[in-house]
Image (cartoon, rainbow, N blue to C red):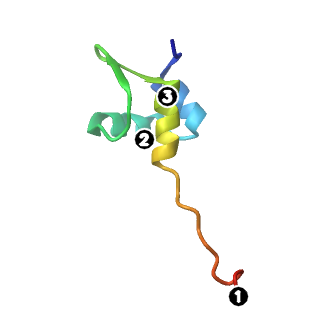
Amino acid sequence: MSELYTVHEAARILHVSPKWLYERTRKGAIPCRRLGKYVRLSQDDVKAIIEQHAAPARIDNQASR
């Protein structure tokens, strides 16, 4: 079983504010688990958030000339 993080713990791991995570969980924009009124994020949820917000690689056209 995967460990579950509180919003504050996950925010620390992701280097974002808890407010940012809470806003996105309310909008359904990021994966999370709801246990009654409590929001928890699994290790897989944290990985999915990282993947979901990964910026595409920038190709430098100058280097290929």
Callout 1 secondary element: loop
Residue at 46%, 30% (x, y): give it. Answer: 45
Residue 15 in percent (x, y) is at 58, 40
Residue bearing the label numbered 1: 65
Amino acid type of the residue tagged 3 in the rendering: Asp
Left or right: residue 40 versus residue 2 is: left
Query: Which callout, 2 or 3, points to the residue nearer the camera?
Result: 3
Q: Which of the marked residues, 2 or 3, is nearer the chain's N terminus? A: 2
Q: Which of the marked residues, 1 or 3, is nearer the chain's N terminus? A: 3
Q: Which of the marked residues, 1 or 2, is nearer the chain's N terminus? A: 2
Q: Compared with residue 65, is residue 11 higher up or lower down, i.e. above or below?
A: above
Callout count? 3
- Badges 2 and 3: C-beta atoms under 8 Å apart? no
Amino acid type of the residue tagged 1 in the rendering: Arg
Callout 2 secondary element: helix
- Badges 1 and 2: C-beta atoms under 8 Å apart? no
Residue at 56%, 37% (x, y): give it. Answer: 14
Callout 3 secondary element: helix
Residue bearing the label numbered 2: 20
Q: In which quarter of the image is residue 35?
A: top left
Question: Which is nearer the eye, 60 or 13?
Answer: 60
Q: Compared with residue 54, is residue 63 higher up or lower down, i.e. above or below?
A: below
Most extreme residue toward the front, as rendered? 64
Left or right: residue 56 versus residue 32 is: right
Residue bearing the label numbered 3: 44
